[in-house]
């Protein structure tokens, strides 16, 4: 039995988290979510629209069995706004999971490390299972861990860019020292990149654009699920050490142990 | 004549827009970080034969950043009183048409009608500042609207920082304010009297809006007033200026084209649909993450074609008359003629047929 993904008191068997924006229609989004087998699905509070079923993302997601919602605070520019959004989202969704997403620049959408840290601290104290979307900064990762976050979610590259793991070396540093799950969020384009992230030690990945903008979103959701599972299985199996020179299968020094 | 700030001067790049060849156009289409040089190439005559390639690139970028969605909003005209002398506008104070403004009750009726159409984002409009529809009137309307809609923006007159701050406090998220023309000579000719004659005051209004804490500013040039290539080059520089100066500022760009209006103004530099499309593609290629807006001034066919291919935000079922949705006597002729008259349901069916999801609510009052 493979180890589960633990976030606060919650446990999950799937290590693929998915987003719900950018889809051509609600049915496509729901089919992709189901096909991905994701147990954690993020949805922006600003897209909650209880009054209009056709425009609402929250309602239909709540109907999928086995899915835990992770509302996100996208739209917030400050810690205060993110905290307010988180409170409202918890009330409306009933979920304690919150993805802290604070990107004051509405164009490049890069997360604000200072406001994210402040919001995470406040929300952790309020009993949320805090999942901060963050720059791939190893120092910030430890600071977020210290204030009680349930995970850290460093970006692979810019949201929606499909540039893959351009922050690979920094994420490796985060992974090396983290005692909470490390979830790569944003920028992944291909399932192979998700597998690689898992193999290098990440605990999960979050994917949205790569699935929503695929030719067949449900099939891509399935492909990501398989490759995340494969990456995790490879990590559990224990990857051989990397070396910069050939290692002979018949070592030159075998005579020494033979003679012993 | 009002002076134009040096950073806005399109002339250093205008020659490029005239002389670029296929090599420059191809380079612009594949540039990782396009510059104004690339932008100029995309507006050049040589780029006209690359329209399809530009559309393909624009579509890819639009879908990549904004997904398979179109954000919808509707304008709500509060008043057509105006002290302005804009020679091209149906609201201009020398146009003879009935003038009125919405009462508190009429505004409520209009908003109810828009809510029934599922609208979640509205743009409140007035003419230039008048005693009938002054700042206090507008501000009161914003507060009323903010109680009903998650997102309220304003397109009115240029304001002072304190006024923008007051709008923000009343629940306004952003403003739209077109410079109309970036050519100071044409600007002076078109704006015959009133506060709006001050080019410098207007060009700095978006800066003041961001300084006040407002989140978004929509800018644009009224295409048709002056040489469109120069206008677009200046508009490009205006976007870059705002991006550098206001790092938290959300900038949107619209592409209003001169439409027939009550006074019969004729465009001295008409922009046809293929060129308008190319302008929009060029902006998308150079600004992958800036929302680009298209209104119902344009035809249904053009809007259908541009949705998701450069454009990611559109108005729907618009009325440009005061009280046009429900409350109105509908005696006035509106600010300009609407070309796309489809209702929300019909328009959304078209979007879905194009595999685009109409998004009504993309904001929340909690962020105020």
Image (cartoon, helix red, strand yellow):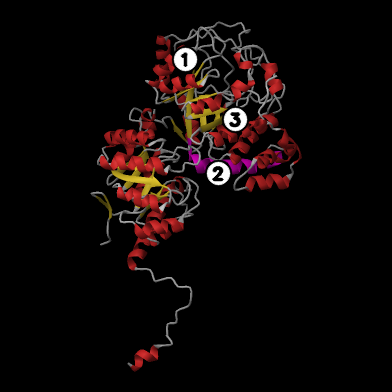
In the rendered image, residue A145, in percent from the top left (x then y), is placed at: 32, 50
- The span shown in magenta is B48-69
Sooner in the amino-acid sequence: mark 3 or mark 1: 1
Can residue B189 be seen at all in this image of the molecule?
A: yes
- The subunit letter for the residue under badge 2 reads B
In the rendered view, tell whether residue B8 sits above or below residue B133: below
The chain holding disc 1 is B
Task: Identify the mark at residue A62; answer none if there is no mark.
Answer: none
| Quadrant for the C terminus of chain B in the image | top left
Do the residues at pointers 2 and 3 share their chain?
Answer: yes
Extreme-left residue of the structure: A9
Cβ–Cβ under 8 Å for marks 1 and 2: no
- The spot of residue B316 in percent (x, y) is 50, 25
What kind of element bears circle 3? helix
Residue B302 got which mark? Answer: 3
Q: Which residue carries the number 2 mark?
A: B60
Q: Residues within 10 Å of mark 2 (few under 14, many from 20)?
A: some
Question: Is residue B295 visible in the rendered structure shown here?
Answer: no
Few, some or many residues within 10 Å of mark 3 (<14, 14–19, 20+): some
User: Within the magenta stretch, is there residue A179?
Assistant: no
Q: Which residue, given by chain and number where applicable, does mark 1 sit on?
A: B138
Quarter of the image holding residue A15?
bottom left
Residue depicted at 68% across the width and 15% down the height: B265
Q: Quadrant of the N terminus of chain B?
A: top right
State whether the magenta stretch is mostly helix, strand or loop. helix
Using the rendered view, name the quadrant where residue A53 is placed: top left
Q: Quadrant of residue B89?
A: top right
The mark lying in front, picked from 3 and 1, is: 1
Q: Earlier in the sequence, mark 1 or mark 2?
A: 2
Q: Chain of mark 3?
A: B
């Amino acid at each position: 039995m493979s180890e589960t993904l633990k976030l606060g008191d919650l446990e999950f068997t799937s290590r693929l988290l998915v987003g719900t924006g950018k889809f051509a229609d609600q049915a496509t989004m729901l089919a992709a979510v189901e096909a991905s087998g994701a147990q954690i699905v993020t949805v922006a509070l600003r897209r909650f629209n209880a009054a209009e079923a056709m425009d609402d993302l929250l309602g239909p997601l709540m109907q999928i069995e086995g899915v835990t919602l992770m509302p996100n605070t996208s739209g917030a520019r400050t810690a205060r706004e993110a905290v307010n959004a988180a409170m409202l989202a918890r009330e409306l969704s009933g979920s304690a999971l919150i993805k802290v997403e604070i990107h004051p620049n509405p164009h490049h959408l890069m997360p604000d490390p200072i406001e994210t840290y402040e919001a995470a601290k406040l929300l952790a104290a309020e009993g949320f299972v805090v999942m901060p979307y963050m720059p791939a900064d190893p120092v910030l990762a430890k600071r977020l861990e210290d204030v009680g976050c349930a995970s850290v979610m460093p970006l692979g590259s810019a949201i929606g860019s499909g540039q893959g793991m351009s922050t690979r070396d920094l994420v490796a540093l985060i992974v090396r020292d983290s005692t909470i799950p490390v979830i790569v969020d944003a920028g992944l384009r291909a399932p192979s990149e998700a597998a690689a992230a898992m193999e290098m030690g990440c605990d999960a990945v979050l994917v949205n654009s790569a699935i929503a903008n695929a030719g067949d979103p449900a099939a891509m959701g399935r492909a990501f699920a398989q490759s995340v599972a494969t990456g995790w299985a490879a990590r559990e199996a224990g990857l051989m050490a990397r070396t910069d020179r050939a290692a002979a299968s018949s070592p030159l020094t075998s005579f020494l142990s033979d003679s012993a | 004549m009002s002076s134009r700030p040096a950073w806005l001067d399109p002339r250093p790049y205008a020659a490029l827009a005239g002389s670029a060849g296929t090599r420059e156009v191809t380079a612009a289409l594949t540039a990782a970080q396009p510059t104004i040089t690339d932008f100029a190439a995309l507006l050049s005559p040589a780029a006209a034969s690359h329209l399809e390639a530009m559309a393909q690139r624009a579509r890819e970028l639009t879908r990549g950043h904004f997904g398979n969605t179109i954000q919808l909003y509707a304008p709500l005209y509060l008043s057509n009183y105006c002290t302005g002398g804009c020679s091209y506008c149906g609201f201009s104070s020398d146009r003879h048409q009935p003038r009125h403004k919405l009462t508190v009750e009429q505004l409520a009726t209009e908003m109810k009608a828009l809510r029934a159409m599922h609208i979640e984002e509205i743009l409140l409009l007035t003419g230039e500042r008048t005693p009938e529809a002054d700042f206090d009137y507008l501000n009161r309307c914003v507060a009323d609207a903010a109680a009903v809609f998650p997102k309220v923006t304003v397109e009115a007159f240029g304001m002072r920082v304190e006024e923008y701050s007051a709008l923000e406090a009343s629940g306004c998220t952003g403003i739209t304010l077109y410079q109309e023309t970036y050519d100071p000579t044409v600007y002076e000719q078109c704006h015959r009297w009133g506060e709006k004659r001050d080019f410098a005051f207007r060009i700095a209004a978006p800066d003041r809006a961001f300084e006040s804490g407002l989140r978004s500013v929509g800018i644009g040039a009224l295409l048709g007033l002056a040489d469109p290539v120069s206008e677009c080059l200046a508009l490009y520089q205006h976007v870059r200026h705002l991006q550098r100066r206001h790092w938290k500022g959300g900038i949107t760009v619209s592409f209003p084209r001169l439409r027939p209006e009550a006074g019969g103004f004729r465009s001295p530099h008409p922009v046809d649909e293929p060129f308008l499309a190319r302008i929009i593609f060029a902006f998308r290629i150079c600004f992958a993450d800036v929302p680009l807006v298209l209104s119902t001034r344009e035809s249904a066919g053009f809007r259908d074609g541009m949705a998701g291919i450069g454009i990611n935000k559109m108005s729907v079922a618009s009325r440009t008359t005061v009280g046009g949705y429900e409350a109105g006597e509908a005696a006035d002729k509106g600010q300009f003629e609407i070309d796309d008259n489809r209702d929300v349901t019909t328009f959304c069916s078209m979007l879905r047929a194009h595999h685009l999801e109409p998004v009504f609510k993309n904001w929340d009052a909690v962020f105020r």
